[in-house]
Amino acid sequence: MPPLVPFIALAALGLAGVLALGAPAVVPVRSLPTPRGGSGTVVDLTHLGLPHGGARKRPPAAVVVHYSAGTAGGVVADIAKQLLQHKASYNYLVDRKGTVYLLLDPRNIAHHAGGGALVDGRSPNEATIGVSFVNVGWTPFNRGGWPRLAPPPVEIQRRASKWNGDDPRFLNLASASWEPFPAAQLQAGMVLVAQLHRDFGLAANALAGNRTVFGHDDLAPWKADPGPAFPMDAFQQGVRQLLRRPSATPLS
Ligand SMILES: [Zn+2]
């Protein structure tokens, strides 16, 4: 796990006003960050009432990227149901076509990265916005068109084997197949994340070279998401490229 880059104190950047302290737990969607580009669509699913940790006391310092995982990885309604069952939440979900779903106001603390390494001296849930991509993740079986990449860590394979009846193939993987992330999905994710950087004051940190986008696997080595199929370096570069433009226009 790479060392975490300490973040410049957000207060020094004059960002005290970015986050309205004492804001109501749920705010109208029209007042939330709305990414331009991608599909141009944000679907408000906050009425689902996903569990959360209340309003942030300090502005977020970074974004954590996930994949939705599971055999139901492609169906947004099923993902939301699973989140409810597991008392978990993301702030946003991006589907394969680039539609962005608002699950939880980013001014609230989502339950998406509990137990991971500290960010900005805080628990990752308190310090980060959770953005998940609709994606199955990995499978030990050779799926047509899915690249075969390095296997997930042994601990993840061991857990997976329990979910799959101790199938020994999960413990003896030379490689796994990972679902690719479509370009439209990645582009919509970059536009969303760049917009969040602007709205929550992360932009200056990102452009100063500090890391403001983490994978869940960066913070929690027992997690496989977003995994080797997610182009993290290119994604971060794309976000910075958008931030250098006068407005968050989509990449061509
Ligand atoms: Zn995750």
Image (cartoon, rainbow, N blue to C red):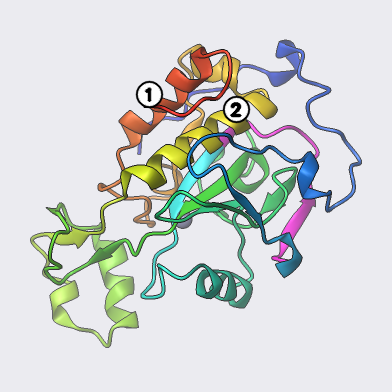
Which of the two discs, 2 and 1, labels the residue nearer the N terminus? 2
Q: Which mark is residue 237?
A: 1
In the image, residue 131 sits, relative to residue 187, either above or below, namely below
Whether residue 129 is in magenta: the answer is no
- The residue positioned 63% from the left and 24% from the top of the image is 198
Please provide percent x and percent y for residue 10: 70, 20
The extreme bottom residue here reads 165
Does label 2 point to a residue whose CB lies under 8 Å from ligand 1? no
Circle 2: element type: helix
Looking at the rendered image, the quarter that the C terminus falls into is: top left
- The residue positioned 14% from the left and 72% from the top of the image is 141
Looking at the rendered image, the quarter that the N terminus falls into is: top left
**Residue 131 visible in the current orientation:** yes
Residue at image mark 2? 197
* Left or right of 82, for residue 174: left
Q: Amino acid at mark 2?
A: His
Q: Nearer the viewer, residue 218 or 208?
A: 208
In the image, residue 194 sits, relative to residue 72, either above or below, namely above
**Residue 214 visible in the current orientation:** no
Q: Nearer the viewer, residue 36 or 32?
A: 36
